[in-house]
Amino acid sequence: MDGGALVGATRFPAPQLPRESLIIVSLSKEECDHLISLAKPHMKRSVVVDSQTGETNESSARTSSGMFLRREQDKIIRTIEKRIADYTSIPLEHGEGLQVLHYEVGQKFNPHYDYSENGCNTKNGGPRQATLLMYLSDVEEGGETVFPSAIAKSSSSSRFSVKPFAKRGMSVKPKMGDALLFWSMKPDGSLDLKSLHGASPVIKGDKWSATKWLHVHEYKLRSLVMHRFMFADMLADVLGFDFP
């Protein structure tokens, strides 16, 4: 796959997963490796954010490590982000920077919602309306994305490993290059309860992923420094070399 288009889309009708979820082949191996290589030197213990105060704290509910890449940080990231915008019909400017996450054996993220009606998470861009989870590596065992409140139904797709639980809930097995798009918000602007999701503990191997949160309104970059970095990256593309 050359990374030029999103292909292999499989639509799962609501109410199986949160609002018309899609599983898509999103990234080439080269793109996955590029995101991991950019992130590796800067990984830190993941934190949880208090939606009202904005305070961040480490928590036993989330034990991965992670970091944020800048929006439009380089040519490859710009290509990925434009592809996401074209496919979702959500403007590129509504997205946060890609968050790259690494899960080692035993690490997890307990079920949670990405959506918040008010509080600090909505001051920039309004609520998060959708989430795109991109799997940057295969996982030998464990590490599934789980949707505990989704209504279990058998899937007609054999391309993707989507499994119903015994009575309720779904899990999606990570596979390098696959991406899962789901909506946290209903069309009327309220929380979709089926968007409750988490990351199961890795049992064997490790897991790399990238998350793109998409807001209702423009998500503004927080610093002029970011704009300077973006200008330097664009200039490097034109001149054909990278700045140190």
Image (cartoon, grey):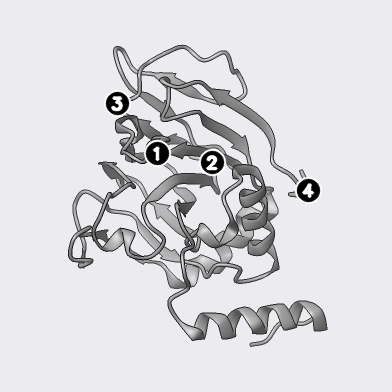
Marks 4, 3: nearer the viewer: 3
- Label 1 sits on a secondary structure element that is loop
Q: Is residue 46 at all visible to an observer of this figure?
A: no
The residue identified by callout 1 is: 143
Between discs 2 and 3, the one toward the N terminus: 2
The residue identified by callout 4 is: 2
Question: Looking at the rendering, in which quadrant would you find the C terminus?
Answer: bottom right
Residue plotted at (42% across, 55% down): 102
Marks 3 and 1 in Cβ contact (< 8 Å): no
- Label 3 sits on a secondary structure element that is loop
**CA distance for labels 1 and 2:** 10 Å
Report the residue that reaches farthest toward the right: 239
Amino acid at dot 2 = Asp
Disc 2 residue crowd, few under 14, some 14–19, many 20+, Cα 10 Å = some
Q: Position of residue 34 (x, y in %)?
A: 63, 61
Q: Position of residue 138 (x, y in %)?
A: 54, 41
Query: On residue 138, which mark appears?
Result: 2
Question: Looking at the rendering, in which quadrant would you find the N terminus?
Answer: top right
